[in-house]
Amino acid sequence: MASADQIKALLRSFVDRDDAQFLSIAMQVAAYEAKRGHGKLAEEIKDLIDAAKEQRAGRELLGRDPTPISRPRGELANLVSVTYPRDKLVRMVTSETVRERLLRIIREQRHFQRLREHGLAPRRRLLLTGPPGTGKTLTASVLAGELGLPLFLVRLEVLISKFLGETAAKLRLIFDAVRDTRGVYLFDEFDAIASQRGMSNEVGEIRRVLNSFLQFIEHNDSHSLIVAATNHPELLDHAVYRRFDDVIEYDLPSPAQVADTLRGRVHKFAGSDVDWAELGMVASGLSYAEITRAADEAMKDAIIGDRMSVTQADLKAALTERLAMRPARATLT
Ligand SMILES: Nc1ncnc2c1ncn2[C@@H]1O[C@H](COP(=O)(O)OP(=O)(O)O)[C@@H](O)[C@H]1O
Ligand SMILES: [Mg+2]
């Protein structure tokens, strides 16, 4: 028979819905049995594992959700939307500091089982701050993509306006899901509840919602990641910051980061005359999102004009056009 520790570890990975961990412990059980001379049992266990792996691979090939259980049902479906991102960290252009912080979160999450065996918890409550279009939402996608988890999006603004008076109750439903279904839960527009100001008739309600939110995250020891994002950190109540395991600040790109973003986006489409460094200077002040759009616009023009590559002039024109639209950028998210 498998050891008590192995049985406990199996159950734990089942509860966490961590298939990979479950199968890896099952392999350990097989090895353990083989060592004790139970060759036939060991073979049978290995066959079962192989069959499970094949089934999993088949499901993924068919493009079906690897975790069908995580589709929100019933009332929850009105409160959160789910996606299964495949974004990876390499896609993001960031400062070295932000990259290190994100890598650390991913690393701790990947080893959560081991940390937990020592009574420790991985970083899981994150606050992302910074101007629009600097990669906060993308970060939530990347964390989900890197960890193979579903991404649940909660739009607090909508939650509050739609369920005024019942928002705290709805929040409880969401936090039940946080506990029951491992995933990345993005609370976008976090300032909608965490700001120090507010319209006077809603202040009481919003206070209550914020207090429940803070209590939920304080008492939450699930394996989900809770990511709150805001474009307006200056509006946040100071008490809010210390409830998070990590606060990550995003910024507009430097000229070198603009160049990296453009290069990453245009890639093989770039003509031989493109001077990335010069474009980095041209785009100064634009967000990553605006630069990405400008790159896409230049590529679309080239494709429609039957040209196989994008020139320096195309990119410069698209960036300049974006710069001219800047008064509208306050609404860009
Ligand atoms: N740091 C980044 N590196 C590369 N692309 C980025 C970055 N930040 C934003 N983008 C691009 O802009 C789009 C919108 O960014 P998003 O993450 O929604 O910004 P935010 O949530 O901060 O407003 C992303 O989907 C991506 O294409
Ligand atoms: Mg966003």
Image: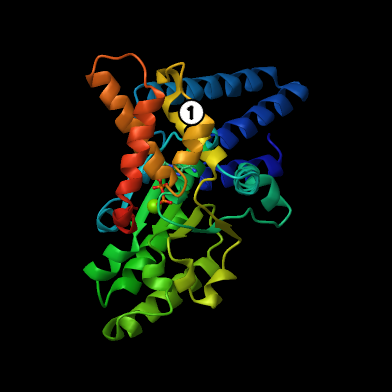
Residue 159 percent across, percent down from the top left: 29, 65
Q: How is the image coloured?
A: rainbow
**Amino acid type, mark 1:** Arg
Which residue corresponds to the image point at 27% horizontal and 53% vertical from the top-left?
77
Q: Residue at x 47, y 46 (%)?
A: 284
31 relative to 4, above or below: above
Q: Secondary structure at mark 1?
A: helix
Left or right, 308 with respect to 259, comes to left
Residue 150 visible in this rendered orientation of the protein: no
Where does the image place residue 200, in percent across and percent down from the top left?
30, 86
The reply, left or right, for residue 328 in relation to residue 51 is: left
- Write the residue at 23% across / 18% down: 305
Q: Which residue is mark 1?
A: 263
Front-most of residues 321 and 157: 321
* Quadrant in the rendering for residue 206: bottom left
Report the front residue among 31 and 222: 222
Q: Position of residue 283 (x, y in %)?
A: 44, 42
Asked whether residue 195 appears in the rendered view, the answer is yes
Q: Residue 83, percent across and down? A: 35, 42
Few, some or many residues within 10 Å of mark 1 (<14, 14–19, 20+): some
